[in-house]
Amino acid sequence: MTNEKPRFETLVVHSGVQPENWFGSTLPPIFQTASHRAATAEQLSDLFAGKEKGFIYQRLRNPTNEALENRIAQLEGGLGAIVTSSGMAAIHNSLTAIAQSGDEVISGNSLFMSTYLLLANVFKRFGIKVNFVESTAIDEFENSVTSRTKAIFVESVGNPKMDVPDIEKLAVIAHGSDIPLIVDNTMPTPYLLNPFNLGADIVVHSTTKYLSGHGDALGGAIVDSGSFTWPNEKYPDFEMFKERAGKKAYLDKAWREIHINVGATQSPFHSYLTMIGIDTLAVRMQRHIENTKKIVEFMANHKKVKWVNHPSLESSPSYETAKKQFPRGCCALFTFGLANQKECFDFIRNLKLAYHLANLGDCKTLVIHPYSSQYVSFDPATRAKLSITPDMVRVSVGIEAAEDIIADFDQALDQV
């Protein structure tokens, strides 16, 4: 590595790699151990007291996980990161490190199913009130801030609503009220979007998706920019962590108070697999975006397709915001509509190449009918509020030849 900051395509391959510490290995060793031996009682005491840096127990820290944390932090341009057992664990831990009973959070209403259920139902049991607003309505965020508001949370691209909040404007609102902006950047990845450059303070990921890229490793990550100051009058419980960790106060608090006590630790083997996946993130995302453009165009012109929703389309209400925030392209997810649920089922049944399953961000093209699967237990009013309709199919575009994906979709539509 040179003194000049490497470009993303280089950083994605070399960041977090330490052959000099890994006996020459260019991949991190898998430290598949529940605990680490200390040489003396004094050393173990110093490790627990934080006087010495090292490893004690896998739930606390793990060398393989630490390698992944360093890599993700560098890719996002953050001060540090914590990897978790899943993307949902990352969202839970990121917010409960800030908000407690009696506090409020403002969230965009365009959310993945489990994220919505966590914020709407589970947090209510914790005494944390979440105020949901239209994700693209900046004035609604501003009007919802109260003296109890502790954070704003949004997805950088709503799943599956496909809307794009203006992160720069939300950051201005958040900081004007002395609260942090948390962005779930799972869908674009740091290759397509760096929320910290737009003013976000904390980024979360489901590493299961594009960072891993192969549907083989479950995980999540919390990344801190280190830029939010956590003013004492609004966050008095941060004072001891600021004294202890300085700019890493948030990470220290999230780790000490929530992460290690909830036990949301990522498997070292999954961290290892994710490290391998990240090596090809840049080239995969290029192909994902190229394929998405071709397939969205094909579907938008197909006579049996009633509508197509992707932020790159001029028909999208988020078109202008997406064009501003995503110069390399927005994401490889889109939705489209057929006449009714039966036609959606027929389309899915007739597919030969694309896989029908509940995931996204895989190398393979994936489809799902959200209304009858992920959101099947939601009441009609909530489905409508989240834009989950029976005529909608969600597509996660893979990196196969675009022509083959199109041919598969075409023959499946012909049989509808």
Image (cartoon, rainbow, N blue to C red):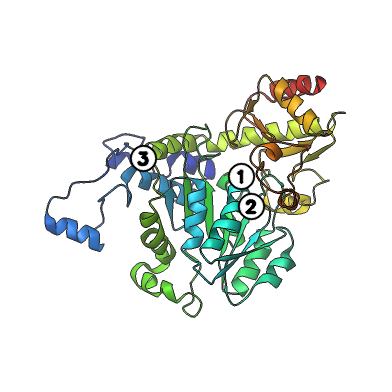
* Residue type of the residue flagged with mark 2: Ser
Point out the tag, 2 or 3, that comes first from the N-terminus.
2
Name the amino acid type tagged 3. Answer: Pro
* Residues at marks 2 and 3, CA–CA distance in whole angstroms: 28 Å
Q: Quadrant of residue 404?
A: top right
Secondary element at tag 1:
loop
127 over 121 or under it: above or below? below
Report whether residue 58 is seen: yes
Measure the alpha-carbon separation of dots 1 and 3.
Answer: 23 Å
Q: Is 258 situated left or right of 347 in this image?
A: left
Sequence-earlier tag: 1 or 2 = 2
Q: Quadrant of the N terminus?
A: top left
Which residue is located at x 32 percent, y 50 percent?
61
Mark drawn on residue 187:
1
The residue drawn where x is 79% and y is 28% is 343
On the image, the x and y values in percent for residue 104 come to 58, 69
The residue where tag 3 is placed is 268
Q: Which residue is mark 2?
A: 156
Q: Position of residue 335 (x, y in %)?
A: 73, 38
Which element carries disc 3, helix, strand or loop?
helix
* Amino acid under disc 1: Met
Pointers 1 and 2 in contact (C-beta within 8 Å): yes
The span from disc 1 to disc 2 (Cα, nearest Å) is 7 Å
Residue at image point 69% right, 67% down: 141
Residue 77 appears anywhere in the view: no
